[in-house]
């Protein structure tokens, strides 16, 4: 029976000298170190030279050496079993770097030998020494962390911040915070508007209109409102210290805002009962007179008992009489039916979506208001993707009822403009859906309109709406970029 061949230990020879002059000295050159290491390898059974790594003229104060980096890459790749040097200081002169290198060797199962100092991690004594060194390395890291924490605490007590990006309203000059006038004005606006409205989302909406940026999140406003640095203080480990920087707002204003945030809040901004199930409450505006259309209801006695019907009524008819506005009111169920039936109908028509996508690309070539420039459409957004996303959203809303449906609607819809002739839905992403009464008009591939009947009779009756045969056509128009299109489809 053939004897099993012993496994060879693949050895890496690493040599280094600090200067070119040392590299030329006979007994201190890389070649002299290599010869001594080769003699050692020849004396060990099962050892073989896998690769020689030379760094002539490189300092041992750091690990930024080409041959050493190549050696580490080969170790990670599993090409080396043992690293052998003439002395430990040939590998590195930094204790911290040495500890880190030993940890890398240990992680990848690689041993280390210093020929002249008999440091050999393949022996029990060598492994004991290695473990002791790694313990000291961990101890040194913990000491360094403690020193950093102490330094940060001292800086905070002196009124200085500890690195990182400067908070909104400030810039850093020479390690100190200095007020940046333009952004500081934004901070003041946020606090004053929040105290006035008592709603962070209302502040966000105001900033979006001011900056023409519909993607600004509520988290930006909340981060500013919760940061005590704007009062001239420094926060560290939950403690406040007087800062060396100037305050943007007063402590009184900051504390007032914190008190408002600490107040118990409702889980939803939806109107209270009996209108909490109406998804468009507070979102509808009358096109004819510009007034808000607020929820209303009427109770009627039926054979089965008393039944309640809900409407959206133009508030001008409440203040100035029923004939003050021709819009008057619309059944809540009918408005919901108009919007979602047509969105579903659009989403089920591939040609309809395709035509809107083509029209959308043409719209994006038109000039925009100053300061708002559209980004190019992505080829990744196809009519098929837009159609599937719209279908998923509409079907998801259709399955929901009550508050769940109201929340889903309000997540995507920002405003609804209603009149007898037109319904316009503005989404939070910036997209707009417009419905026009167009009786007996066939579907056209040119404008992708939907056959509809006039809804002018809606306001003439307070009875609940019957099943609709047709409803206003809807058009998608003016989305500024791909992200907004996807947001419109997915909400």
Image (cartoon, rainbow, N blue to C red):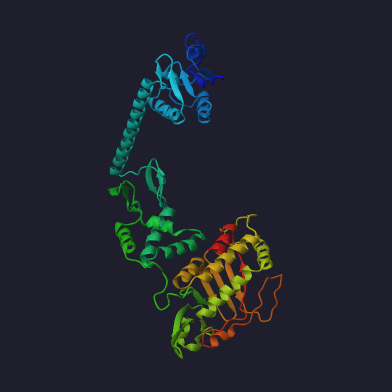
Eyeballing the image, is 50 above or below 194?
A: above
The residue shown at (43%, 27%) is 101
The residue shown at (64%, 69%) is 348
Residue 296 percent coordinates (x, y): 45, 82
Eyeballing the image, is 66 above or below 446?
A: above
The residue shown at (35%, 56%) is 226
Eyeballing the image, is 448 above or below 101?
A: below
Q: How many marks?
A: 0
Q: Is residue 62 left or right of residue 140?
A: right
Q: Quadrant for residue 5, please give it.
A: top right
Residue 437 percent coordinates (x, y): 63, 79
Would residue 52 be visible to someone looking at this image? no
Would residue 207 be visible to someone looking at this image? yes
Residue 490 percent coordinates (x, y): 55, 62
The residue shown at (48%, 82%) is 313
Viewer-side residue, 83 vs 329: 83
The outermost residue toward the top is 26
Q: Quadrant for residue 103, please give it.
A: top left
Q: Quadrant of the N terminus?
A: top right
The outermost residue toward the front is 1
Viewer-side residue, 192 vs 135: 135
Eyeballing the image, is 58 above or below 345?
A: above
């Amino acid at each position: 029976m053939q004897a099993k061949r012993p496994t060879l230990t693949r050895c890496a020879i690493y040599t280094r000298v600090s200067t070119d002059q040392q590299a030329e000295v006979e007994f201190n050159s890389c070649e002299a170190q290599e010869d001594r290491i080769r003699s050692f390898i020849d004396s060990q059974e099962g050892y073989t030279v896998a690769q020689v790594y030379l760094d002539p003229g490189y300092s041992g104060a750091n690990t930024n050496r080409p041959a050493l980096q190549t050696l580490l890459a080969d170790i990670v790749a599993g090409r080396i079993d043992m690293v052998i040097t003439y002395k430990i200081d040939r590998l590195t002169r930094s204790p911290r770097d040495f500890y880190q290198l030993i940890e890398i060797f240990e992680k990848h199962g690689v041993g280390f030998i210093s020929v002249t100092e008999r440091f050999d991690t393949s022996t029990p004594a060598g492994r004991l020494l290695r473990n002791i060194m790694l313990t000291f390395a961990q101890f040194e890291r913990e000491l360094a962390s403690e020193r950093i924490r102490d330094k940060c605490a001292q800086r905070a007590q002196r009124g200085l911040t500890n690195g990182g990006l400067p908070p909104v309203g400030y810039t850093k000059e020479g390690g100190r915070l200095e007020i940046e006038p333009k952004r500081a004005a934004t901070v003041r606006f946020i606090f004053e508007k929040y105290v006035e409205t008592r709603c962070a989302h209302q502040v966000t909406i105001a900033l979006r209109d001011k900056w023409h940026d519909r993607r600004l999140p509520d988290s930006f406003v909340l981060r500013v409102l919760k940061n005590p640095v704007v009062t001239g203080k420094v926060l560290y480990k939950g403690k406040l210290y007087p800062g060396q920087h100037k305050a943007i707002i007063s402590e009184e204003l900051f504390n007032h805002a914190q008190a408002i945030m600490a107040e118990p809040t409702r889980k939803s901004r939806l109107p209270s009962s009996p209108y909490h199930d109406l998804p468009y409450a507070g979102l509808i505006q009358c096109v004819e007179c510009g007034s808000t259309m607020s929820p209303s209801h009427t109770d009627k006695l039926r054979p089965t008992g008393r039944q309640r019907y809900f409407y959206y009524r133009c508030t001008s008819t409440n203040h100035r009489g029923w004939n003050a506005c021709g819009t008057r009111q619309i059944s809540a169920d009918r408005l919901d039916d108009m919007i979602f039936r047509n969105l579903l109908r659009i989403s089920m028509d591939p040609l309809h979506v395709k035509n809107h996508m083509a029209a959308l690309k043409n719209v994006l070539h038109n000039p925009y208001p100053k300061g708002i420039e559209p980004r190019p459409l992505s080829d990744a957004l196809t009519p098929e993707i837009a159609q599937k996303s719209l279908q998923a959203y509409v079907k998801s809303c259709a399955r929901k009822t009550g508050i769940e449906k109201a929340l889903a609607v309000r997540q995507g819809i920002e405003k609804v403009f209603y009149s007898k002739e037109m319904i316009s839905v503005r989404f939070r992403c910036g997209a707009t859906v417009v419905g026009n009464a167009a009786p007996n008009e066939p579907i056209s591939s040119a404008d992708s309109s939907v056959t509809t009947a006039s809804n002018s009779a809606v306001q003439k009756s307070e009875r609940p709406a019957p099943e609709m045969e047709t409803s206003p056509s809807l058009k998608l128009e003016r989305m500024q970029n791909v992200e907004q299109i996807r947001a419109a489809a997915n909400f």
